[in-house]
Amino acid sequence: MVGTVRSSDEEGFTFISRERLPRGMFVCYTDAGKKILCRVKCGEPLNQYPQEFLLDMNIEADEVSGFYGLDPADFKYYSYSAAAIGYFDATLGEFINPRTNPACGQRIEHAGSDILKDISKLEKGERGSAFIGTVLGAEADIVLSVRDMVSQHISVIASTGAGKSYTVGVLVEELLKPYNMAPVLIFDPHGEYSSLNEISNMPEFITSYRPGVKIVKPEHIKIRVGDLLISDFISIMDDGTISDKMKTLFRSAYNNLKNNHKKPFTRNELKQEIEALRDSNNEPTIEGILWRFGKLYAPIFDDFQTIPLAEYFRVGQLTVMDVSGIEETYQQLIASVMLRRLFDAKEGTENNRYNESHIDKFLPYPVFVIIEEAHRFAPHSGEAKSKSILKTILSEGRKFGIGICMVSQRPSKLDADSLSQCMTQITMRIINPGDQQQIAQSIETASRDLISELPSLAKGQAIISGVAINTPTMVRIRKRLTSDIKGRSKDAPMIWQAQRKYEEKHQAPEVRADKEMDIGV
């Protein structure tokens, strides 16, 4: 027993306890033989010392109260407000709110593992499970439903240094375990996830199955010219001076080529089509298009090489697309082309338009894509080349088996519609008020009292809510199996000292002047 119910209202109920209980902690009471899970919202002392007892800093308030004949124990009780979550219905697979508050005098107990286990939809190690951590302040495991994450998307939101990349690493480890064997791709703008290549050699992952890890470096990422849309070409060529006439002529050349070629075309073929439109009236315009067309000969573009979907999305394989060092506009373009081709392939597979002979357009199984720095690719204000297709996949991709994980440290800069489509949320420490407001508006399942906890969360702590878990919960993220070298902040003083020692060790001897050769004036 932890306390006794004092009163109740439409917001919940209050109970009295002598224990110090943190906000978000789970307690329970018994009603008609069923244990009702409740969450502590906030607490305050039931009785307060008179102000005069606190004025002398050298005397304990308990001593003063004893001197006046008051019992110090009377000031050790706390009044807590709490809200009932409900009892777990195994048939429905969810908590059912009793719609009544406990009666005055009802005993409140600590929530034990027998009821906390119902927070998770699956058991640890079960097929389709993802063991992410434990209930904060308890030892009960928190296990997410991979099926719900993949079919209805997930977001991981945290301030810098709160453990965002670490948590994504934990999630990827679970997806690659033998009881999932997911095809996972990480779109990595900073090159943070290369340490996950350890997975393929770790005994925790190896049974009769062995996961694969493919790290794709920037120099090996190519965009096939034939995969670009008219809008892609114009955005690449437009430096702010391209005229409407240039755009109109280019569209004509592009459409002529598309209508006459079933296979992807090359740059030279498109260039020839532009040349074919030349006449005495538009020669300067054609020259202007061809001059700007030179941008398509950058190393990232290719006539034949493309993003090989079937190679990147294999069952039981993690693919890390390291796009670090590539300028942001090209990162958006790569993401746009990759997601667009993925969506077309999955849509075609679902509608039986493709078969196994179309190896690069046949993905008959669900896939999972993690987008780091998601606010770059679906910004709240402004446009990005990848924003439209990303929003399409978030709203329609679940039908075709494309799961998206959006990872960001600035939710206020992330498109609100895109964030609201992520039906499971892992939210870590958020300090910025604007970011907190965006989270509150986007996460319908998390209560206001939990949102208020975001600034005080320690590193590695998170609020998990949404469809992959039965009720919003404060969680301590489990320890990663793989190392997290690149995700950590650099120890600047240590690096400076090491650099200084290196320079001193390899410094050339100082050349001193020969005093005998010193000639005074």
Image: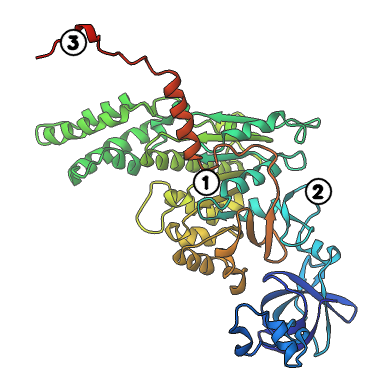
Q: Earlier in the sequence, mark 3 or mark 1?
A: 1
Please, which residue is most extreme toward the right here? Answer: 33
Please, which residue is most extreme toward the top here? Answer: 516
Q: Earlier in the sequence, mark 2 or mark 3?
A: 2
Please give the residue where the numbered disc 2 appears in the rendered image. Answer: 126
Q: Nearest the camera: 436 or 370?
A: 436
Tell me the kind of residue under disc 2: Glu
> Residue visible at 25% across and 12% down?
513
Q: To which quarter of the image does residue 360 belong?
A: top right
Which secondary structure lies at badge 1?
Answer: strand
Between the C-alphas of marks 1 and 2, the distance is: 26 Å
Q: In the rendered image, which quarter contains the C terminus?
A: top left
Which secondary structure lies at badge 2?
Answer: loop
Q: Earlier in the sequence, mark 1 or mark 2?
A: 2
Q: To which quarter of the image does residue 361 belong?
A: top right
Residue 149: x %, y % from top left: 65, 53
| Mark 1 in CB contact with mark 2 (< 8 angstroms) | no
Which secondary structure lies at badge 3?
Answer: loop
Residue 397: x %, y % from top left: 56, 51
Q: To which quarter of the image does residue 212 belong?
A: top right
The circle drawn on residue 371 is 1
Residue 3 vs 431, above or below: the answer is below
Tell me the kind of residue under disc 3: Asp
Q: Is residue 361 visible?
A: no
The circle drawn on residue 518 is 3
